[in-house]
Image (cartoon, rainbow, N blue to C red):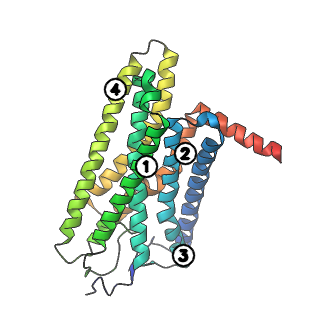
Amino acid sequence: MANSSSITHFLLLPFPGTRQLQLLHFCLFLAIYLAALLGNGLIITTIAWDHHLHTPMYFFLLNLALTDIGCISTTVPKSMSNSLRDTRDISYAGCAVQVFFFLFFISAEFYLLTSMSYDRYIAICRPLHYETLLGSRVCLHLAAAAWACGALNALLHTANTFSLPLCQGNVVDQFFCEIPQILKLSCSTSYLTEVWLLMVSISLDFVCFVLIVVSYVQIFRAVLRIPSQQGRHKAFVTCLPHLAVVFLFISTAFFAYLKPSSISSSSLDLLLAVLYSVMPPAVNPLIYSLRNQDLKAALSKLIIGQFQKQ
């Protein structure tokens, strides 16, 4: 029986099959990773370049793109490297770093999504007070709070999890280091402290979820009262992409962490992890860009301008 002081590395969940299937996994993850980097990189560059997009909505979208890049860069490159080298190893320190940064970016993203729902609520339900309630200072404070809360949440969970004695081996039943899988390796009832911390975090996340739901209930009530069909369409177009991103992120993440242990399996855990940690960073830029005429126009001007310079 190993304890945490003797563990120097962990073994991640391998993608089973032949060498050809491992290379297929590498190519698939590489394509998703490059798509996420390209899509989010274009959003960041476009918003930073076009001063017409220097508004609260696009400021939060820029921050969301940063969290997406950070989140997928924390987990996918290591998994690709292991598949390419036909190994499962990750160092103890590397696992701790991966847990910290994954929690940091995923928590910050959720708090940013909450701020974005508040932004849409003010823009549609209280448009005359938009500049007052969401000035540049308020936006900076909301974004800073999201990043700071994400860092604090990640630090508390990482420090507590890796202070636990581990005596159930070093096999992590996931393709990246994840707290629920590491807790399964604990041999002490002290893991209950981390369980309580997780419950506190989930409760705070649930409060954010309620705020998002309340915001959108008010938004849809206000939109349905808009007399012109064009006005209703424009309001829906700015809100539906955000709502789609929220639903994809929350539904998969909440189910992954709150599902009964009786239906847990390696295959299901792997599928859910891919859905809430890998797919959103790649899909989010597509969702926002397809429904946002201002962003598409600015991106077209940016690309055309770069070609003309050449």
Q: Residues within 10 Å of mark 2 (few under 14, many from 20)?
A: many
- Circle 2/circle 4 CB separation < 8 Å: no
User: Who comes first in sequence, dot 1 or dot 4?
Assistant: 1
Task: Tell me the kind of residue under disc 3.
Answer: Arg
Drawn side of residue 115 relative to residue 53, left or right: left
Q: Residue at x 31, y 37 (%)?
A: 211
The disc placed on residue 258 is none
Q: Amino acid at mark 4?
A: Gln
The dot on residue 19 is 3
Q: Is residue 245 left or right of residue 182?
A: right
Q: Tell me how far mark 4 sits from mark 3, CA to CA.
A: 53 Å
Q: Amino acid at mark 2?
A: Pro
Of marks 3 and 1, which one's residue comes earlier in the chain? 3
Residue at mark 1 to residue at mark 4: CA–CA distance: 26 Å
**Crowdedness near tag 1: few (<14), some (14–19) or many (≥20) residues, C-alpha within 10 Å:** some
Pointer 4: what residue?
Answer: 218
Residue 15 percent coordinates (x, y)? 45, 70
**Quadrant of the drawing holding the N terminus:** bottom left
Query: Is residue 48 found left or right of 265 in the rendered image?
Result: right
Residue carrying label 1: 144
Total number of numbered discs in the rendering: 4
Horizontal and vertical percent position of residue 171: 34, 77
Which secondary structure, mark 3?
Answer: helix
Are circles 2 and 3 on residues that touch, CB within 8 Å? no
Residue name at image x 40 percent, y 36 percent:
117
